[in-house]
Image (cartoon, grey):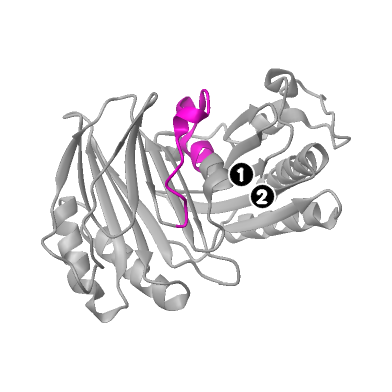
């Protein structure tokens, strides 16, 4: 999908250098994406404030930086995640100059004016998750990234330089289609299999999930194989068509209700029986969640009051924080269009 890899960066109150490192990594990533010096500086301020808040209020946490390109736009999604004491008054934290962390005092209000999107989710004694989307252009410019509420995290396991997982999306009027691929094992050979699945998907996104998966199965015979799932939402018809093989989990969330979609056993590119496509009901309020087995399956969005209505990137961040296995590549794709 991109040459740039998402990054997860630790933040710890005992080592203030973590904040500076996160800021430098974010600015370097923004420069590679063609951000102006102004936008790089604004991103640096947001990262500094977010990391300092994590260190001061929670003691430790992490910053996740996710670069992306969509149509003519490019940007970086920032997630600041911790399991600290939480925020007692999120609304007041958006007031200009308000800071209880002894930080630059930019405040969430000032940060939200610099970001294209900014949301915070916090529960007392359960931690805080901050999501900021920084587009390459200023937040007042028209950008297609705000038309579609999509968020994704794709991180390599510790010790690996590339992720064996991959994901992609494609939009046309009235239709959106999503893929998550998990190459067998991890490392470069797993990444090769996952990226080959993405290549086929990008070449033929107009086909049905079943047909795309058949083509991917043929293409992956020269690789070690992968688990692959594809979901197509036909918005006007209020239906999801889904085809999956292997251990990619997929669910439709609607309020407190969650419905898991059915994948077939096997490994795409090697041992697969007949590939089936299933159809499910979709409502305008529904949310699609797809993830690799780097995320435990015991999660429930319903256990987080109000989270289902937040931006999908924030949902992905909370699930990653609380349910990532931390010993495998992990991908989480969340969409609500």
- Whether the magenta-drawn stretch holds residue 167 is answered as no
Do labels 1 and 2 touch, CB within 8 Å? yes
Q: Which percent across, then down, holds residue 325?
A: 53, 56
Outermost residue on the left side: it is 274
Circle 2 residue? 63
Q: Residue at x 22, y 77 (%)?
A: 221
Q: Is residue 131 above or below residue 216?
A: above
**Which residue occupies the foreground of this view, 257 or 150?**
257
Q: Is residue 18 above or below residue 320?
A: below
In the displayed structure, does residue 154 sit left or right of residue 64? left
Circle 1 residue? 79
Q: Which percent across, then down, holds residue 268?
A: 24, 67
Outermost residue on the bottom side: it is 222
Q: Residue at x 58, y 45 (%)?
A: 321
Q: Which percent across, then down, holds residue 74?
A: 50, 50
Outermost residue on the front side: it is 298
The tag earlier along the polypeptide, 1 or 2, is 2
Quarter in which the N terminus is drawn: bottom left
**Which residue occupies the foreground of this view, 74 or 198?**
198
Segment colored magenta:
294-316
Q: Residue at x 49, y 66 (%)?
A: 3
| Element type at mark 2 | strand
* Residue 135 shows in this picture: no
């Amino acid at each position: 999908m991109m040459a740039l890899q998402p990054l997860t960066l630790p933040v710890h109150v005992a080592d203030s250098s973590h904040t500076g490192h996160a800021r430098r990594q974010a600015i370097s990533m923004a420069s590679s994406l063609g951000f102006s010096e102004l936008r790089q500086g604004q991103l640096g301020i947001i990262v500094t404030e977010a990391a300092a808040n994590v260190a001061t209020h929670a003691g430790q946490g992490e910053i996740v930086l996710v670069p992306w390109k969509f149509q003519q736009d490019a940007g970086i999604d920032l997630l600041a995640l911790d399991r600290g004491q939480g925020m007692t008054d999120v609304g007041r934290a958006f007031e200009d100059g308000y800071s209880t962390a002894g930080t630059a005092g930019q405040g969430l209000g000032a940060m939200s004016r610099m970001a294209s999107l900014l949301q915070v989710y916090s529960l007392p004694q359960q931690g805080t998750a901050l999501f900021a989307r920084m587009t390459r252009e200023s937040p007042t410019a028209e950008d297609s990234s705000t038309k579609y509420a999509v968020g994704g995290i794709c991180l390599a396991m510790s010790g690996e330089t590339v992720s064996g997982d991959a994901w992609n999306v494609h939009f046309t009027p009235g239709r959106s289609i999503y893929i998550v691929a998990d190459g067998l094992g991890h490392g470069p050979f797993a990444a090769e299999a996952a990226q080959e699945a993405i290549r086929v998907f990008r070449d033929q996104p107009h086909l049905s999930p079943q047909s795309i998966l058949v083509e991917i199965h043929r293409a992956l015979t020269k690789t070690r194989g992968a688990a692959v799932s594809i979901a197509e939402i036909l918005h006007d018809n209020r239906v999801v068509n889904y085809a999956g093989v292997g251990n990619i989990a997929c669910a439709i969330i609607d309020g407190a209700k969650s419905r898991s979609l059915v994948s077939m056993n096997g490994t795409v590119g090697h041992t697969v029986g007949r590939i089936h496509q299933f159809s499910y009901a979709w409502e305008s309020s529904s949310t699609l969640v797809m993830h690799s087995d780097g995320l435990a399956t015991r999660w429930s969005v319903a256990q987080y009051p109000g989270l289902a209505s937040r931006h999908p990137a924030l949902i992905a961040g909370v699930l990653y924080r609380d349910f990532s296995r931390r010993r495998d590549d992990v991908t989480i794709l969340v969409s609500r269009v």
